[in-house]
Amino acid sequence: MVRRTLAAEVCIEGIALHAGVRTKARLHPAAPDTGIVFRRCDLAASDPIPALWSNVAETRLGTVIANEKGASIGVIEHLMSALAGADIDDCLIEVDGPEPPILDGDAMCFLRPILEVGLRDQVGDRPKLFVRRPVEVHAEDAGCGLYPDDSTKFHFVIDFESAAIGRQEFAFAFSRRAFEEEIAPARTFGFLKDAEALRAAGLARGANLSNTLVIDQDRVVNADILRFQDEFVRHKILDAVGDMKLAGYPIGGRFEGRRSSHSLNNALLWELFANPANYEISI
């Protein structure tokens, strides 16, 4: 398959999830072999930040990448997921703040304008990473793994004490159409009991009842905006698709997550690349 980039520039503007300020993300077509690269255009002489697993600097409340000079971009997983869903290999993303906008808290709000401008084929073939041996990481009752498979698949299980979520499981065979219909619309979620502490710490200031599914004990406060009954596990797959995009290659293999987090997803890529016998990169 050939590499792809955007056919034209895309500009997306809105409120950032944690910073609570209005930010703008400009997605530009990029030359072959550029990969996905971010740049903080609000910082003087800001160096690019390649969107790679090895540049992940923080994972507590979203995936944050940074460069050696300390410039960082946070909460990139939804945008990365949309780029993966659109099969985009090369793109320069300029953000005029610490995070891209959160918009609807899903990947569809990025995917839709990307598909509207269309894609352009690049010169040269697209390398793909094939998982050759099982790779796993664990932390207490959570874990995730990558396993050899003929195609790209995601399987996720979550289990929360809240009856509003409970145990949810979803399996997803990756394709652009399936991603657009089954995964991209799934919104992020959080618990009302955590909101006050997060805001006191200067976080989640852009979260609201239109971009975040809010759980209060055993009920979804804004259940009227649910798009799927199992939207919570679908969003966990959305996050995993974005985090696996940081491998720098499309992955041929099966991702399995059990209550996994951004931290474990990143640890999985470190484990994958720790041994060249775990994978093979080919055209």
Image (cartoon, rainbow, N blue to C red):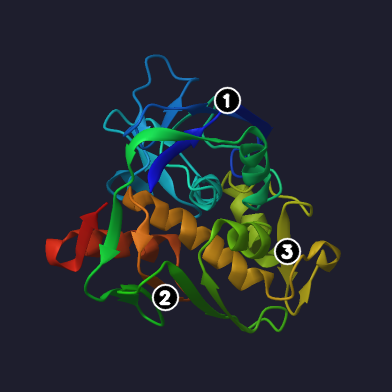
Give neighbour class at mark 3: few <14, some 14-19, many 20+ (Cα, 10 Å): many
Compute the Cα span from label 1 to label 2.
34 Å
**Is residue 205 visible in the rendered structure shown here?**
no
- Would you identify the image quadrant in which residue 272 lies? bottom left
Compute the Cα span from label 3 to label 2.
26 Å
Q: In the rendered image of this protein, does residue 23 appear above or below residue 54? A: above
Q: Position of residue 238 (x, y in %)?
A: 55, 60
Q: Position of residue 3 (x, y in %)?
A: 39, 41
First in residue order: circle 3 vs circle 2 = 3
The reply to whether callout 3 and callout 1 are in contact (CB within 8 Å) is no
**Is residue 243 visible in the rendered structure shown here?**
yes
| Secondary structure of residue under mark 2 | strand
First in residue order: circle 3 vs circle 1 = 1
| Secondary structure of residue under mark 3 | strand
Q: Nearer the viewer, residue 243 or 33?
A: 33
Q: In the rendered image of this protein, does residue 42 appear above or below residue 156? A: above
On the rendered structure, is 116 left or right of 70?
A: right
Name the amino acid, label 2.
Answer: Glu
Q: Nearer the viewer, mark 3 or mark 1?
A: 1
Residue at the spot of label 3: 214
On the rendered structure, is 161 left or right of 93?
A: right
Name the amino acid, label 3.
Answer: Val
Q: Which mark is residue 9?
A: 1
| Secondary structure of residue under mark 1 | loop
Q: Give the residue at x 50% y 54%.
A: 61
Name the amino acid, label 1.
Answer: Glu
Q: Position of residue 198 (x, y in %)?
A: 60, 53
Residue at the spot of label 2: 256
